[in-house]
Image (cartoon, grey):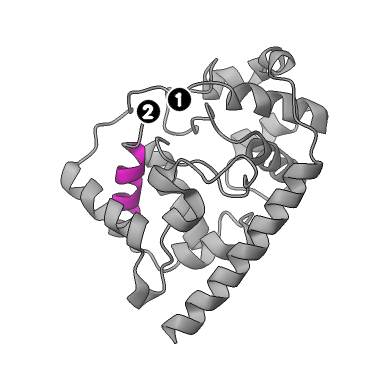
């Protein structure tokens, strides 16, 4: 049963990889210089350089441009609806070109080297094991397969899965919980929803603690 389940997940991931690569190949890259001015409307929450000072808002510095564009468009369309503030701000992005320029600017920035909260080392060790090995008995696919070593992503050509290493701990906790509870539903093929539903509160906290410590 476990092997069958993993085979299905692997098939979905392969399809998403190909889809992500195709979408990226056709997408026009943004202009980070133009994006700096356009990103001014984002600075109040995400920081001038994409390093937000509140865990309520994700760090965007170094994130894949195409992933940022997708989130903006998902908020605009209502496909993602787990943050009313972001939904309102996304509505102010006038065009896809503007979204790409903003994404290109934040993607070109460097992630800050300090976390907002210090990581509990023992909990981080548990999170690392779950991140790298998953939990086969519960059907939890290892996060590393999609998000790469230390959560730093696979490749800009495979931007379907975001860079999450170094992201704020509490932001990760919120979004994993939102996926689990159905408040966020814009994941490819429902993959994150399926995985998050199998995670306990303690496992979510452990994963978030590990990932938040994966800074430059």
Q: Position of residue 168 (x, y in %)?
A: 40, 35
Q: Residue at x 65, y 43 (%)?
A: 157
Q: Residue furthest bottom?
A: 1
Q: Is residue 192 above or below residue 198?
A: above
Would residue 66 be found to the left or right of residue 2 on screen? right
Sequence-wise first label, 2 or 1: 1
Would residue 208 be found to the left or right of residue 188 on screen? left
Quarter placement of the N terminus: bottom left
Would residue 192 be found to the left or right of residue 133 on screen? right
Task: Magenta stretch: give its range.
Answer: 204-212
Q: Is residue 72 above or below residue 103?
A: below
Q: Residue at x 28, y 31 (%)?
A: 117
Main SS category, magenta section: helix
Estimate how packed mark 1 is, as few (under 14), some (14 to 19) or many (20 or more) residues with alpha carbons within 10 Å.
many
Q: Is label 1 in a helix, a strand or a loop?
A: loop
Q: Residue furthest left?
A: 122
Q: How many marks?
A: 2
Residue tagged 2: 216
Q: Does 183 lie within the magenta span? A: no
Q: Dividing the picture into quarters, in which one does residue 200 lie?
A: bottom left
Residue 12 showing in the rendered view? yes
Residue tagged 1: 111
Q: Residue at x 43, y 40 (%)?
A: 171
Q: Position of residue 45 (x, y in %)?
A: 54, 24
Q: CA distance from mark 2 to mark 1?
A: 7 Å
Q: Is residue 147 above or below residue 196?
A: above
Quarter placement of the C terminus: top left
Instruction: Please state which of residues 110 and 96 is positioned toward the viewer in this rendering.
Output: 110
Would residue 96 be found to the left or right of residue 4 on screen? right
Q: Dividing the picture into quarters, in which one does residue 19 lie?
A: bottom right
Q: Is label 2 in a helix, a strand or a loop?
A: loop
């Amino acid at each position: 049963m476990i092997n069958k389940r993993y085979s299905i997940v692997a098939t979905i991931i392969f399809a998403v990889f190909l889809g992500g690569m195709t979408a990226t190949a056709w997408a026009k890259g943004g202009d980070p210089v133009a994006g700096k001015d356009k990103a001014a409307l984002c600075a109040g929450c995400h920081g001038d350089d994409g390093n937000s000072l509140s865990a309520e808002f994700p760090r965007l510095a170094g994130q894949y441009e195409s992933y940022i564009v997708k989130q903006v468009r998902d908020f605009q369309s209502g496909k993602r609806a787990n943050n009313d503030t972001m939904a309102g701000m996304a509505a102010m992005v006038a065009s896809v070109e503007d979204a790409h320029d903003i994404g290109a600017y934040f993607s070109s920035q460097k992630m800050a080297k300090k976390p907002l909260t210090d990581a509990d080392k023992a909990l981080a060790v548990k999170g690392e094991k779950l991140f790298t090995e998953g939990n086969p008995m519960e059907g939890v696919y290892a996060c590393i397969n999609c998000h790469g070593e230390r959560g730093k992503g696979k490749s800009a050509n495979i931007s379907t899965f975001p860079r999450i290493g170094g992201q704020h701990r509490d932001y990760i906790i919120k979004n994993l919980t939102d996926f689990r509870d159905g408040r966020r539903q814009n994941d490819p093929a429902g993959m994150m929803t399926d995985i998050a539903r199998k995670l306990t509160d303690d496992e979510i906290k452990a994963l978030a603690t590990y990932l938040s410590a994966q800074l430059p």
